[in-house]
């Protein structure tokens, strides 16, 4: 009971004090913040005071905000929306819109001067709009040396924002054209200044340019970020080429010299009697000038052996035999052979390409040949009065036969045949020499002259004749022949 009495007394005393001194307590803060997106009629402040019996504080009349007293509390309502942003992104922001102030007054009942308070309202900006971009400059890059990094353009002059205060836009290069190639090795944008720089010397024939970024140029995809919003804009880049590169041989279906297109050597396998277009891999070729489009190319062709020069034609990217090698050579080739064709292309600047080599492997079919077989036999004959040995060589010729080309013979086989022939020749020569010697000896013996011998009785041993003292007489006899000579021994 005592507690209830105390509470009633406290409330009563407080009410009396409030009625006696209504301007002692200020229920509104000195600074009130609201978002620029707040619309007209929205409540931007509600006081924590909920026990006021009447409205003591009054705000001066204005068209922006209004102070009201609702359900024993003070509220402030926004009468007019405050948009800090500009309509045209290129316009400058209007200063002073970010905050404004109003006076709140409380009138005393004791006749004293009213109490006056200043309330400041702060409009909080919001990042509502993405960056806006008009036409960006066209970038032209010439092939050659420049001082790096090389300034190309200030892109922040082209990317704008409606938001106020102006957001700082961060510019980046995300990709190049539709290939999504990384162009960071060639270009860079300074984050602070938004300046676009060239970071690498430009070589038109570099495969990064030829095969990735495009021969004539392309588009850098530049993005501008202000936090939650991103805007992209393609920036056209044109490459100005210097005609300083010779042509390159490529496959006929290629429109550039990229990756698997270049060709340096091809092969064709043909039969000796074939005539017409030769089958190669790739089936056809051409030369491209990396510097010039369209390409203006002239071709020069050399053929080895030179005797076949007029039989090979380069036509519409293919190689053609005007005649078969058999007809062109008069069937003089006896074994497989290779014809080498060397091509060079000359571009509009007079520079010549590397050589393209075509190797034509010609298959010569087997031919019909006649082989003569000789058989050697030896016959021994005997002559009288002396015995003579002769070797007679007779040749037996086998009938001609039709064969395939003789199998290849190695060096050992050839050496063995040569040895056999040498032995036969030496045997024949030896026999002839022996026969000649026998004939010579025989003839010499038959032509030897006969000699006469005197058979006289002589005195021997004290002058006594051998015939008993008979008178001396002359006798002749043939020169005796050695018995063995008659037998030819």
Image: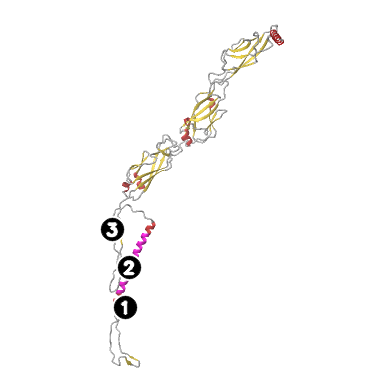
What residue does disc 3 label?
A: 398
Instruction: Judge the density around disc 2: few (<14), some (14-19), many (≥20) Cα neighbours within 10 Å.
Output: some
Q: Give the Cα separation between the discs numbered 3 and 2.
A: 26 Å
In front: mark 1 or mark 2? 1
> Who comes first in sequence, dot 3 or dot 1?
3
Q: Quadrant of residue 47?
A: top right
Q: Is residue 275 left or right of residue 169?
A: left
> Who comes first in sequence, dot 3 or dot 2?
3
> Could you tell me if residue 304 is visible in this image?
no
> Who comes first in sequence, dot 1 or dot 2?
2
Residues under numbered marks 3 and 1 in contact, where contact means CB atoms less than 8 Å apart? no
**Which segment is the magenta one?**
416-442
Q: Whole-percent x and y of residue 249? A: 42, 39
Instruction: Judge the density around disc 1: few (<14), some (14-19), many (≥20) Cα neighbours within 10 Å.
Output: few
Report the front residue among 484 and 6: 6
Against 160, residue 308 (above or below) is: below
Against 72, residue 148 (above or below) is: below
Label 2, secondary structure: give it.
helix
Report the front residue among 424 and 116: 424
What residue does disc 2 label?
A: 431
Residue 143 among those drawn in magenta = no
What residue does disc 1 label?
A: 484
Q: Give the Cα separation between the discs numbered 1 and 2.
A: 25 Å
Report the front residue among 214 and 35: 35
Label 3, secondary structure: give it.
loop
Q: How is the image coloured?
A: secondary structure
Main SS of residues in magenta: helix
């Amino acid at each position: 009971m005592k507690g209830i009495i105390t509470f009633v007394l406290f409330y009563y005393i407080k009410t009396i004090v409030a009625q006696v001194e209504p301007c002692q307590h200020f229920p509104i803060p000195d600074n009130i913040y609201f978002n620029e997106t707040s619309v007209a009629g929205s409540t931007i402040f509600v006081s924590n005071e909920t026990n006021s019996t009447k409205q003591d504080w009054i705000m001066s009349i204005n068209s922006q905000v209004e102070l009201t007293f609702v359900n024993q509390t003070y509220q402030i309502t926004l009468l007019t929306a405050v948009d800090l942003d500009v309509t045209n992104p290129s316009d400058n922001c209007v200063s002073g819109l970010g905050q404004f102030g109003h006076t709140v007054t409380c009138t005393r009942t004791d006749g004293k001067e009213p109490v006056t308070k200043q309330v400041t309202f702060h409009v909080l900006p919001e990042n509502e709009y993405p960056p806006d971009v008009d036409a960006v400059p066209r970038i032209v890059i010439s092939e050659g040396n420049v001082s790096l990094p090389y300034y190309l353009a200030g892109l922040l002059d082209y990317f704008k924002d409606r938001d106020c205060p102006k957001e700082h836009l961060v510019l980046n290069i995300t990709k190049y054209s539709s290939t999504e190639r990384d162009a960071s090795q060639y270009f860079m944008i300074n984050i602070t200044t938004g300046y676009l720089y060239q970071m690498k010397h430009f070589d038109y024939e570099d495969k990064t340019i030829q095969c990735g970024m495009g021969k004539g140029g392309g588009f850098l995809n530049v993005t501008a970020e202000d936090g939650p919003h991103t805007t992209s804009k393609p920036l056209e880049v044109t490459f100005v080429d210097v005609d300083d590169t010779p042509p390159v041989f490529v496959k006929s279906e290629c429109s550039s010299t990229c990756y698997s297109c270049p060709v340096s050597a091809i092969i064709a396998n043909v039969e000796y009697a074939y005539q017409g277009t030769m089958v190669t891999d790739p089936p056809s070729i051409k030369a491209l000038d990396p510097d010039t489009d369209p390409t203006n190319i002239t071709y020069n062709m050399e053929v080895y052996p030179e005797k076949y020069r007029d039989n090979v034609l380069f036509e519409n990217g293919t190689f053609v035999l005007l005649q078969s090698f058999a007809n062109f050579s008069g069937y003089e080739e006896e074994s497989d052979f290779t014809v080498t064709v060397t091509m060079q292309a000359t571009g509009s600047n007079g520079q010549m390409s590397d050589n393209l080599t075509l190797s034509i492997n010609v298959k010569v079919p087997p031919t019909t040949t006649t082989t003569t077989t000789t058989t050697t036999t030896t016959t021994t004959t005997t002559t009288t009065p002396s015995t003579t040995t002769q070797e007679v060589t007779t040749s037996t010729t086998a009938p001609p036969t039709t064969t395939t080309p003789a199998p290849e013979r190695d060096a050992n086989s050839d050496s063995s045949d040569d040895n056999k022939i040498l032995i036969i020749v030496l045997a024949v020569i030896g026999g002839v020499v022996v026969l000649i010697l026998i004939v010579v000896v025989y003839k010499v013996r038959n032509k030897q002259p006969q000699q006469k011998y005197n058979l006289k009785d002589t005195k021997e041993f004290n002058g006594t004749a051998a015939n008993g003292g008979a008178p001396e007489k002359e006798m002749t006899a043939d020169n005796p022949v050695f018995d063995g000579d008659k037998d030819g021994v």
